[in-house]
Image (tube, coloured by chain):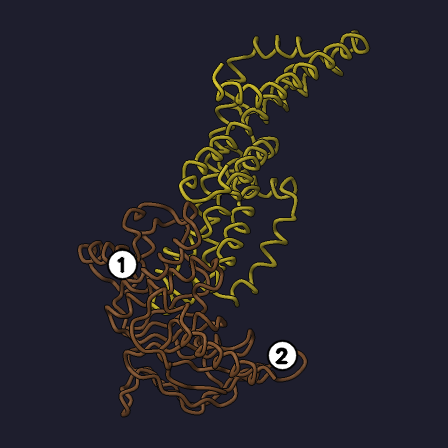
């Protein structure tokens, strides 16, 4: 095995073994103590079987939720950075708005979700809006922190050469903020999936293209715990996938100059 | 304050420039009123203990800070460059990109920028590193890039704020020699802030020594050193005498 291959194995093997041990323990506990009440805790083998049987439903549900989460995430990235730029443009504006942006962040999305249904109706719009609301704040706060952390000497340098406000933004503040924007986006990627699923639980619709939130609700009503677990596993996989894509993108984007790029 | 020409022909003229800050425990007098003229094309070192306000004075000359009072006349404000204590390069730009920055900010056309950047990098012997990122280079190389960034605008006035203070002595000496060669070739005016007596002795045609806060001028004299300034100069008796003179002035100012 090459040095690189063995390093990769060293990286992947421990978590893989950990997962296997956990699944085995899960299987054992479920079979020993919940054999007659499998609806309480189905063994992983039963979950896998249910997932295979309902693979078409789960695949399309994952795709549906993934689409909504991705849309919400993209909106978060674009509007979040834009909002941070507006806030950073003036101390006064930041002082006037930022506390409320933070306060808004503490409002639980589960409490806002019904409001989204009232405003946007049952359907994908509400789901995307929910994914957006949940994921936008880390982008705003991290972008703002990145812009605020610009070295004062570099601001002096730009001032000495008579840089215009726009040049300071595009040539200094935004490039300097990219590593922290990337941090915000990585957090936002995971949150967007959560937001989409919460949105589906409240504003989802079973008739057409149901997402994972709908599958969870349906399985719960039918006490099909195995399918419920399978849907939860799909949600987790979706979150990890989106997080990994964003991390990879950030790494490709920053690796040339930023030593903290991972 | 502005770039109107001074009647005396000085590159920099300060009249009664002083600075005070308000701090939580009262007003801090950073600079006592200072009168100073720096001749066009001269190399002047501004020496003083840490916290004496010499950097503040430089920032006032650069227009980065307003004085609390007095008049600052800088003849070629539009052709002024500033070198900071650390290199302060943009890490996301290559060396060439960093050196090109002042020209970009001034709206020079792309076609002209590349040639000037190449020339400035060659002047500090970094031609082979145009496409390297700052993180991949040593502190001395980054500082040289920072000087190239200052030189690329073909300045008439170069303000330097302890530019080599963070470097090891060998690197610092080599950069001092490099700077003198560039000064000899281009004859811009240099105002060089340092707390290093030997560095000031080696570099300057005129040394101004400042006292402890509130900073005022305690010594201002042309260098007695004549002839070419090469590395060997540091071993000569005249050099030691000159440095000793500065050290005594510094000692007087620190009391």
Residue A208 showing in the rendered view? no
Look at the numbered disc 1 and give the secondary structure of its residue.
helix
**Residue B228 sits in quarter:** bottom left
What subunit carries mark 2? Answer: B
Circles 2 and 1, Cβ within 8 Å, touching? The answer is no
Q: Calculate the distance from the C-alpha at mark 2 to the C-alpha at mark 1.
A: 43 Å
Q: Earlier in the sequence, mark 2 or mark 1?
A: 2
**Percent x, y of residue A160:** 36, 69
Single out the residue that lies furthest toward the left: B111
- Residue named by callout 2: B23
**Percent x, y of residue B155:** 28, 70
Q: Which chain is yellow?
A: A
Looking at the image, is B56 positioned above or below residue A176?
below
Looking at the image, is A240 positioned above or below residue B14?
above
* Rendered residue at 68%/80% (across/down): B25
From the image, state whether disc 2 or disc 1 is nearer to you. Answer: 1
Q: Which chain is brown?
A: B
| Nearer the observer, A216 or B236 | B236
Residue B163 showing in the rendered view? yes
């Amino acid at each position: 095995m090459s040095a690189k291959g063995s390093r990769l194995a060293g990286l992947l093997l421990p978590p893989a073994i950990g997962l296997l041990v956990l699944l085995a323990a899960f299987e054992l506990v479920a079979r020993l103590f919940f054999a007659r009440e499998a609806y309480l805790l189905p063994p992983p083998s039963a979950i896998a079987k249910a997932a295979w049987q309902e693979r078409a439903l789960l695949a399309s549900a994952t795709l549906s939720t993934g689409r909504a989460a991705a849309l919400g995430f993209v909106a978060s990235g674009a509007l979040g950075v834009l909002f941070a730029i507006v806030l950073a443009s003036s101390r006064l504006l930041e002082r006037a708005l930022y506390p409320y942006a933070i306060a808004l962040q503490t409002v639980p999305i589960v409490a806002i979700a019904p409001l989204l249904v009232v405003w946007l109706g049952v359907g994908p719009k509400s789901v995307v809006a929910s994914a957006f609301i949940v994921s936008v704040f880390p982008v705003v706060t991290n972008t703002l922190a990145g812009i605020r952390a610009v070295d004062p000497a570099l601001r002096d340098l730009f001032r000495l050469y008579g840089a215009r406000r726009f040049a300071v933004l595009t040539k200094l503040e935004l490039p300097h903020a990219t590593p922290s924007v990337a941090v915000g986006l990585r957090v936002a990627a995971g949150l967007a999936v959560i937001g989409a699923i919460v949105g589906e639980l409240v504003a989802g619709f079973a008739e057409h293209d149901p997402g994972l939130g709908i599958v969870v609700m349906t399985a719960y009503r039918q006490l099909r715990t195995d399918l419920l677990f399978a849907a939860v596993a799909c949600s987790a996989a979706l979150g990890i996938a989106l997080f990994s894509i964003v991390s990879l993108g950030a790494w490709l984007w920053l690796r040339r100059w930023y030593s903290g790029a991972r | 304050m502005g770039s109107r020409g001074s009647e005396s022909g000085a590159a920099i003229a300060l009249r009664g420039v002083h600075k005070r800050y308000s701090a939580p425990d009262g007003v801090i007098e950073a600079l006592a009123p200072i009168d100073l003229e720096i001749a066009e094309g001269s190399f002047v070192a501004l020496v003083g203990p840490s916290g004496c306000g010499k950097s503040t004075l430089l920032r006032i000359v650069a227009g980065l800070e307003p004085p609390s009072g007095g008049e600052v006349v800088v003849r070629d404000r539009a052709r002024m460059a500033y070198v900071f204590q650390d290199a302060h390069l943009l890490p996301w730009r290559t060396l060439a990109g960093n050196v090109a920055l002042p020209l970009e900010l001034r709206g020079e056309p792309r076609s002209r920028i590349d040639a000037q950047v190449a020339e400035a990098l060659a002047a500090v012997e970094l031609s082979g590193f145009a496409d390297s990122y700052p993180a991949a280079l040593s502190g001395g190389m980054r500082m040289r890039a920072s000087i190239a960034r200052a030189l690329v605008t073909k300045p008439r006035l170069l303000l330097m704020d302890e530019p080599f203070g963070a470097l090891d002595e060998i690197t610092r000496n080599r950069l001092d020699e490099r700077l003198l060669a560039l000064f000899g070739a281009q004859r811009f005016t240099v105002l060089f802030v340092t707390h290093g007596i030997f560095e000031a002795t080696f570099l300057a045609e005129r040394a101004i020594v400042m006292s402890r806060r509130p900073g005022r001028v305690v010594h201002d004299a042309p260098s007695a050193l004549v002839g070419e300034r090469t590395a060997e100069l540091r071993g000569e008796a005249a050099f030691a005498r000159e440095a000793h003179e500065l050290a005594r002035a510094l000692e007087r100012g620190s009391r």
